[in-house]
Image (spheres, rainbow, N blue to C red):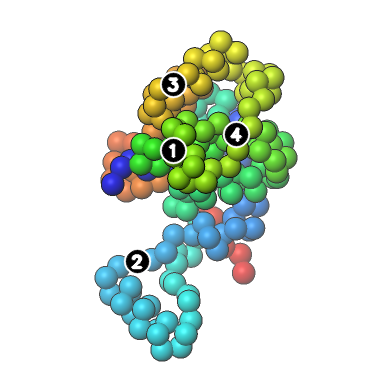
Amino acid sequence: MGTKFANLHIQMQDQQLVLDALRQLTDQAGHVLVKPILNESSILDQYIQRKEDGSSSIETEPHVTYYLHQSGEWTTVLNYYFEWGTVEQVGELLSTFVSQPVMTVGFFDEDIFEWTIFQDGEARSRKLFCGMWAADEYELKPEIVDFTYLQEVVGIKRADLDRLFDSETPEQAVDALSELLNVHLWIDYKVMDSDSESAKRYSRVDQDIRK
């Protein structure tokens, strides 16, 4: 299995506004953003219960957990649910709660790096770093590249964009974008449990799911 990670970033420095937006996100999508409680005994118990009563419920944490980190003008957000293919859906929804751009990053098995920017509930830019075979194999959405938007709103110069888009591999593209934005992109929620040093750089935020 190859490397997989996904993360989300809001072009916002005001932490209270970030928390307010995440509160709205939790209220709208907390049922999918919440982490399931999985241990050997509970997996078996829940399986037996589903077989007996036909339910599909899985025991979950009582709150949604986010990890936040500030990098320049961007606030990084990590969550259990984020992976390539889902983080984009969350980014689209979150962009309806803030006026600033929301950027999502999804990396899958060294085959695909998808960089998308949402604003006002719409994808304003979507760039795929992958081979043609991957685009066909995974039935990827078409790219949306607005150089003017990326220069004026995201603040990346045209020459830098050209160099970024010329990246030969998805890994090179991640490194190049990380350098341009001064944001650490090689990060995922799962790292918070396995790398204590990385976890120290992030602030944990738990938001209760309102009934």
Q: Describe the element under mark 3 as helix, strand or loop.
A: loop
Classify 168 as above or below 89. Answer: above
Measured as percent of width and height from the top left, residue 124 is found at: 67, 33
Look at the image and tell me in which quarter the C terminus lies.
Answer: bottom right
Measured as percent of width and height from the top left, residue 42 is found at: 33, 74
Measured as percent of width and height from the top left, residue 64 is found at: 50, 56
Classed neighbour count for the residue bearing mark 3: other residues with Cα under 10 Å, few (<14), some (14–19), many (≥20): some
Sequence-earlier tag: 3 or 2: 2
Q: Amino acid at mark 2?
A: Leu
Q: Describe the element under mark 2 as helix, strand or loop.
A: loop
Sequence-earlier tag: 1 or 2: 2
Classed neighbour count for the residue bearing mark 2: other residues with Cα under 10 Å, few (<14), some (14–19), many (≥20): some
Residue 8 seen from this side: no
Distance between mark 1 and mark 2 Cα atoms = 36 Å
Q: Which residue is mark 3?
A: 167
Q: Which residue is mark 2?
A: 38
User: Comparing marks 1 and 3, which lies closer to the viewer?
Assistant: 1
Q: Describe the element under mark 1 as helix, strand or loop.
A: helix
Distance between mark 4 and mark 2 Cα atoms = 37 Å
User: Comparing marks 3 and 2, which lies closer to the viewer?
Assistant: 3
Residue 133 is marked as 1
Classed neighbour count for the residue bearing mark 1: other residues with Cα under 10 Å, few (<14), some (14–19), many (≥20): few
